[in-house]
Structure formats: structure tokens, C-alpha cells
Amino acid sequence: MGAIVVTGAGRAFCTGADIDDTFRKQIDGEIEDDFVSGTAPDWVGLIRKAKLIIAAVNGSSIGVGLTMTLLFDYIMASDRARFCCAFVRMGGVTELASSHFLVQRMGWGRASEFALSARMIEAAEAVQLGLSDRLVPHGELLDEALAVAGTIAKNPSRQLQTVKQLLTQNGTDPT
């Protein structure tokens, strides 16, 4: 296996976590405080050390559905995709190093407006802002993502992993 393509089932890519359940578990002590604060470095390390990962965003990508894709190597969006960083609207803050990766992908001003406004943006605007790398017609999304993955995966795996590591070291340090 040379690459991983992640997409959603049905109309949405991922509409986020079950906030009521997560907050209840925190209040009840079922989730330790370090679980919440300690997940960013673990998540970043896992994703950045994994095989090539491509997001094929087929619908709404909200909250953790957005956050998880920010570390992926390539983000493709169907023309039906929508993105929202809704944390502030819900009384929360950005998670899993997303504040770092939003700035890295979009630039300071665009990331600030996107994260602080909690507004929904359509796929074409997401590409324009740098949140997504490529806009694809909805019916072609998975085939296109698999084609990109296949093209990249034809390269030697050791070199792919080394280049991914170099890009990570030189382009990001969220910890």
C-alpha cells in the first residue's frame, strides 16, 4: 500500500464529533484533561509519519471533520464540499493543532477570519483560500483521488517517506 485515500460515506465527509457526548465524558471524568491537551502531538505525529494521505472531501467537513484533513498531504474537494471551523460558535476553541495548520495552509488573515467567523465556505472558495488543493466534479472525486494516489505511490516508498518527513520538518512544527 503506497497511499491512503480518506472520504466520507453518504452526503457528508465528516460533520464533527458528538459534542454533547464528549463534554459529558469530560465532566464525568471519563476523559482525562490530558487526553484533550495531549492529542495534538500524537495526532500530528501519527498523520505526518503515515503513508501519503489524501482527503477526498465529498460533502460537509465541519469541526474535527475539517481538523483531521489539515494534516493530510493533499486535500481534494468535490464541488459539493463545504468547510466550517465552527468551534467558537459552539463555545469551544480550535483543536488538534488546527490553529497552526489553518495558518500554514491559508495564511494568518484568512485563517483568522475563517476560524473566528465560524462561517461555512463552499469548495471553490476553499481552494481559492488554500484550504483545499483541488476542486473536482462530485462524480469524479473518488476516481481522481485514487488516480493521484496511484501516480504518487508509483515512486519509491523510501523516498516518498523521506520527502514527507522533510516537508514536515521544514514546513511545520506545531509542538
Image (cartoon, helix red, strand yellow):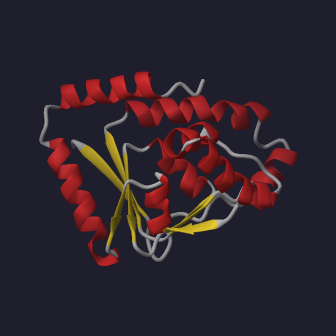
Quadrant of the rendering where the N terminus is positioned: top left
For the point 15% across and 49% down, which residue is it? 151
Q: Is residue 81 above or below residue 109?
A: below
Q: Does residue 18 appear to the left or right of 52 in the view shown?
A: right
> In percent of the image, x 14 and y 31: which residue is there?
156
Q: Residue at x 64, y 55 (%)?
A: 114
Question: Split into 4 quadrants, where in the image is the C terminus?
Answer: top right
Residue 154 horizontal/vertical position (percent): 12, 42
The residue furthest front is: 109
Q: Is residue 147 above or below residue 153?
A: below
Nearest the viewer among 156 and 27 is: 156
Q: In the figure, 76 relative to 82: above or below?
A: above
User: Picture quarter containing residue 2?
Assistant: top left
Q: Nearer the viewer, residue 34 or 107?
A: 107
Residue 48, percent from left and from top: 42, 33
Q: Nearer the viewer, residue 9 or 101?
A: 101
Query: Quick one: which residue is furthest to the right in this view?
Result: 27
The residue under the point 50% across, 46% down is 70
Q: Position of residue 100 (x, y in %)?
A: 60, 36
126 lies left or right of 6 = right
Q: Please provide percent x and percent y for residue 66.
A: 55, 55
Quarter of image, res 87 = bottom right
39 horizontally vs 105: left or right:
right
- How many numbered dots are placed on residues in this image? 0
Q: Report whether 70 appears left or right of 110.
A: left
